[in-house]
Amino acid sequence: MPAHILIVEDDPSTRELMACLLQEAGHAVSGAGDGANGLRLALDGRPDLVVCELRLPSMDGYEVARALRADPGCARIPLLAVSALAQAGDRERVLAAGFDGYLCKPIEPASFVAEVEAFLPVAVEPAAPPSPTLLVVDDDSFMREVLVDALEGEPWRILSAGSAEEALALIARHPVDVILADQCMPGMQGTELMACVSRAHPRTVRLILSGVAELEPIERACAAGLVDRRLSKPWAAGALREELRAAFALHGGRN
């Protein structure tokens, strides 16, 4: 069923783009251009989910998040931060403030709705339940966008994450058929992420993207059954599509 989603964003063009994408997916959307009005709309309207920019006039996103978490009626509303995070520790600060996840700017229109819907409460189903689902994980936002664009037109719902930690939070909330992750990421590397996924979600097909310099840990992970297949960099769009079709077929055989 459609959800009521509140967008708190001071940039009118970004707010309008987000609203259009969510409305096209069947959701009801309300919006605010500053933190104080966003907080008021959330307290009064009790939306199913709040998408909130961090740098806002009157009250910043962190203040909005803390105020909502302190209100008994809004404490459990999922909060999704949106910002161009650039400094070390920003992601940890976002989660510590009470947000459930975050999206980096500029948003990726092809995957924005799917990423937002992944945080909807269990009682509120996405407007168009997706299947199958691919999760792309890369700390480089440009490379994530290139991957998503290269797969346009395929019958897959595409989620994306900028870190292994964000990927684990997403996959815990929404079933993922295939996960495609870069190996070299700050904090938790791709093979470590796949080890976590293999334990918690053994049916998910686990693919690693890497160059030749990163072979040793990936080969060990493949031998241990933690990674299903390594895909080489640089990749070609056609070959990547074929590899992913094979991965979805493998997932079907695991059900």
Image (tube, helix red, strand yellow):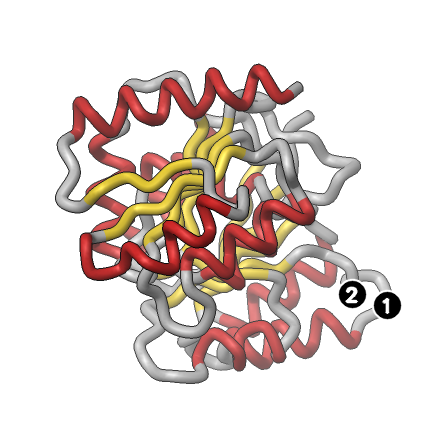
The reply to whether discs 1 and 2 touch (Cβ–Cβ < 8 Å) is: yes
Q: Residues within 10 Å of mark 1 (few under 14, many from 20)?
A: few
Residue 245 image-quadrant placement: top left
Residue picked out by circle 1: 72
Distance from disc 1 to disc 2, alpha carbons, whole Å, reads: 5 Å
Residue 177 coordinates in the image, percent (x, y): 54, 30
Residue 202 coordinates in the image, percent (x, y): 64, 38
Of residues 139 and 251, the one drawn nearer to the viewer in this rendering: 251
Residue 38 coordinates in the image, percent (x, y): 57, 64
Which quarter of the image is occupied by the N terminus?
A: top right
Amino acid tagged 2: Ala
Amino acid tagged 1: Pro
Q: Residues within 10 Å of mark 2 (few under 14, many from 20)?
A: some
Residue 239 coordinates in the image, percent (x, y): 20, 25
Q: Residue at x 49, y 27 (%)?
A: 25
Left or right side of 132 for 208: left
User: Which dot marks residue 161?
Assistant: none
Give the SS element for disc 2: loop
Q: Residue at x 20, y 53 (%)?
A: 211
Of residues 225 and 16, the one drawn nearer to the viewer in this rendering: 225
Which quarter of the image is occupied by the C terminus?
A: top right
Considering every residue shown, the one lying at the far right of the view is: 72
Q: Is residue 68 in view from this perspective?
A: yes
Left or right side of 180 for 114: right
Give the SS element for disc 1: loop
Question: Is residue 74 placed above or below 61 in the rendered structure?
Answer: above
Q: Is residue 112 in view from this perspective?
A: no
Q: Residue at x 50, y 29 (%)?
A: 133
Residue picked out by circle 2: 75
Q: Residue at x 58, y 16 (%)?
A: 253
Question: Is residue 130 placed above or below 201 in the rendered structure?
Answer: above
